[in-house]
Amino acid sequence: MNSKVQSLKAFLASAGRVALVEVAGTKGSTPREKGAFMLVSQEAILGTIGGGQLEYMAIDKARQMVGEEARIEVDEVCATLDVPLGPEIGQCCGGRVEVLIRLVDPSLAAELVAAAESEEAHLPHVYLFGGGHVGQALAASLALLPIHAVVIETRAEALEGTPETVETRLTPMPEAEVRNAPAGTAFAILTHDHALDFLIVTEALKRDDAAYVGMIGSKTKKATFRNWFLKSADGTEAEFGRLVSPIGGDAVKDKRPTVIAALAAAEIMTALAVHNTASDAGRQVRQDKVMAG
């Protein structure tokens, strides 16, 4: 598995002189939030601060600073751009962005790696069961997102071609992975076997801390699962009500794997955002009670 931290380390090690371009402040509507950053060398770029003319201006200034002929003086080690996003630069967001540009020294590089490692350790988890056509398409979509994605399979060949940034697990008992998943995990179930789907979904619905439980299928498959879940698996209507099936919804009638994957990825990200917001609110309420008590 090739993580984003590894990509950052590789960039810093190979790019030569590098400048950190960071959004230091924002007012009004802006392409990216405070803290968003990119790294710029003479030949390469890692990350983005939102694109458009603002980003082009920042890249130009950064490359002036990292240029081989640049004289490294105090005022050239750090620079600030304060840019109104109006028609004069071709971006009509209406806000204002302050961009801080700094040459990356060993100390700053270590800070960037440490921050990336901390962020990666706290990424929400998405467990994807099944590496078939839709599973591989969904894995490719999830690989682009700020999550820790894991593809779980009983067939070794189905894991071939999984994106490098997605973890893979080969196991004869995928349902055990559900039990061991971190709190707040999203579960997407789309294996090659309906009976296996049902077993995994049942385990996932027992997790009241799951952010999302989705199963690929049709209305008939969902009805069949409901009947089995309530009668044979000691499930409840409340638990069944948390199941999303078919994943990605049924508003778009396009069954191509890449389309299903795009819809499911958006659905999963929405569920994770809602779950995290609710969790944060719950923690705040508990903290308030402790302070009041």
Image (cartoon, rainbow, N blue to C red):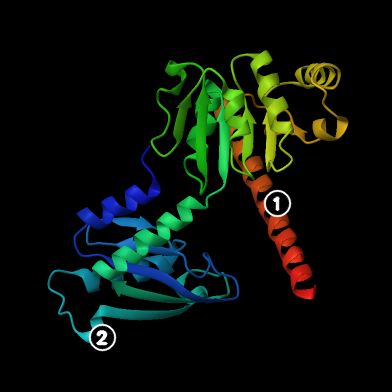
In the displayed structure image, the side of residue 155 where residue 27 appears, left or right: right
Q: Residue furthest left?
A: 69
- Residue 103 makes an appearance in the image: yes
Q: Image point 57% across, 34% down: which residue?
A: 127
Instruction: Using the rendered view, name the quadrant where residue 194 is placed.
Output: top right
Q: Can residue 104 be seen from the camera position used here?
A: no
Tell us which disc is closer to us: 1 or 2: 1
Q: Position of residue 19 (x, y in %)?
A: 29, 68
Please tell me in which quadrant of the rendered image residue 266 appears: top right
Residue 193 in percent (x, y) is at 62, 13
Nearer-the-camera pick, 58 or 229: 229
Residue 213 on image: x %, y %: 69, 34
The local crowd at label 2, few if under 14, some if 14 to 19, many if 20 or more residues have their Cα within 10 Å, is few
**1 or 2: tag closer to the N-terminus:** 2
Does dot 1 land on a helix, a strand or a loop? helix
Marker disc for residue 163 = none
Q: Is 104 placed above or below 78 here?
A: above
**Which residue occupies the extreme front position in the image?**
293
Q: What's the residue type where badge 1 is placed? A: Val
User: Which residue is at a point 73% across and 29% down the rendered structure image?
Assistant: 245
Residue 274 numbered mark, or none = 1
Q: Farthest bottom residue?
A: 74
The residue sitting at 59% across, 15% down in the picture is 192
Q: CA distance from mark 1 to mark 2?
A: 44 Å
Which residue is tagged 2? 75
When the figure is inspected, residue 82 is found, relative to residue 137, above or below; the finding is below
Asked if residue 70 lies left or right of residue 179, the reply is left
Which part of the image, by quadrant, shows the C terminus? bottom right
